Image (spheres, rainbow, N blue to C red):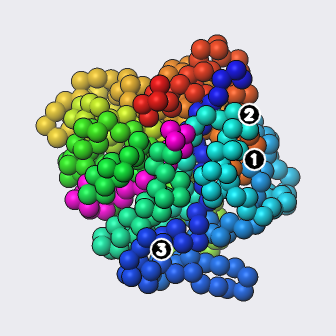
Amino acid sequence: MDYPIFDADNHYYEAVDTFTRHGDEKVRKHVRWMSEGKKQHLFFGDRRSTGVPNPTFNPIARPGAFHDRLKLLEKGNRPRPGMQAAYGELEPLPPEYQDRDHRLAVMDHQNVESVWMFPTLGQCVEHLMHDDVDMMYRVFRAFNDWLDEDWGFNYENRIYSPPIIPLLDVAEGVTELERVLDKGAKLICLRPGPWYGRSPADPYFDPFWARVNEAGIFVTYHAIGGQSPYDDMFDDHWRRPGSSDKTYDGTLRQALFASERPIMDTITALILGDFFGRFPNIQIGSIEMGCSWVPYLMHSLDHAGGFLERRVEAFGKVVEDKPSAIFKERVFVSPFPEEDVIALVDQIGADRVLMGSDWPHPEGNVQPEDYVKAIETLPDDQIRLIMRDNARKLVGAG
């Protein structure tokens, strides 16, 4: 390509002291590593983080190790019985996965101008503190301080690492938002799905959203790893006591509450809750949750409000605009490269699509620029929007 790209889904691998380096004494007692033979496990209190099978990340799978297999699966090919997915040959953890200056050098080689840098482990642990407001915010203050120190909320206008802000308590959420805004954050990362028994459009959260609206900061929702409220839903309604087949239970849970379910629920709650009517400056992005759900969701939204009336009203106000039109005005989507990205462009427009390579995760592209193969039949101006300009504009870089 004759211009550098902007990758809206890069990842770092967290350091061993990510949650404790800037944590106070309570955090250092709460977050602990424990050994089981050669394995290392990370605990938050008495709850083990299970979202990442190897939380020390050393050795690690190569970037794009699963990419070809995922493309075949997306086309309907099925693996032979007994054929297991494999990470391939593991490698020692390279410095560019944990050091931003090494990463910049790699980005230069990859023709990557800028990235949004998301966690690998950090998005997996919020639910482990769902019943402890004080510890939740102590831990994530420490995490965000580590993130800013090691990667930077905005490092040289090239690496934009969104701080994670839990919304277990709205006042604490506002406080942490103000803190990261003061440190120069250009975007934030929130957990998709319900927030501790409430819709994200519930007026309870309006003080937080009002500050986001005022700041004009971009809101990203990234795929959940590890434990989440959806595990609780499954356990309560499908697994009490559950079947005698644990493999079936696991497959059913994955299908009923698939990775796209949280963002579908979030967007539905926001649009039908007149959220964007109350907060006209807020734009949101779905990162690493695919795009196959988009046409179904827009159809579903446009059928809300009664079988014959289609009247959407929330918190004393009628939502006048067509819900699918609101979606196309306020939501950005970063599709998987193995999906039909061209169809997504036809549905919501090239100006609403963000390329995300998921580099260096094994399920992503081998190299970020490889993403262009998914959209190479589009006109050049649309390719440039997706590969560079959309993300630049959202952080005020272009």
Horizontal and vertical percent position of residue 126: 43, 64
6 to the left or right of 192: right
- Residue 392 % position (x, y): 50, 30
Q: Which residues are magenta?
A: 156-174
Q: Nearer the viewer, residue 66 or 238?
A: 66
Identity of the residue drawn at 60% across and 21% down: 384
Residue drawn where x is 31% and y is 62% of the image: 168
User: For the residues marked 2 and 3, what is the alpha-carbon distance in whole angstroms?
Assistant: 36 Å
- Residue at the farthest left position: 316
Q: Are marks 1 and 2 in contact (CB under 8 Å)?
A: yes
Query: Label 3's element?
Result: loop
- From what the image shows, is residue 76 above or below residue 261? above
Q: Judging from the image, what secondary structure is the residue with disc 2 in?
A: helix
- Whether 161 is among the magenta residues is yes
Q: Which residue is mark 2?
A: 370
- Left or right? Give the position of 283 relative to 336: left
Q: In the image shown, does 37 or 58 lie closer to the viewer?
A: 58
Amino acid type of the residue tagged 3 in the rendering: Thr
Kindly identify the amino acid type of the residue bearing the numbered disc 2: Asp
Q: Residues within 10 Å of mark 3 (few under 14, many from 20)?
A: many
Q: Which residue is mark 3?
A: 20
Q: Amino acid at mark 1?
A: Gly
Crowding at dot 2, Cα within 10 Å, few <14 / some 14-19 / many 20+, comes out as: few
Above or below 262: residue 229: below
Asked if the residue at tag 3 contacts the one at tag 1, i.e. Cβ–Cβ closer than 8 Å, the answer is: no
Residue 35 seen in this snapshot: yes
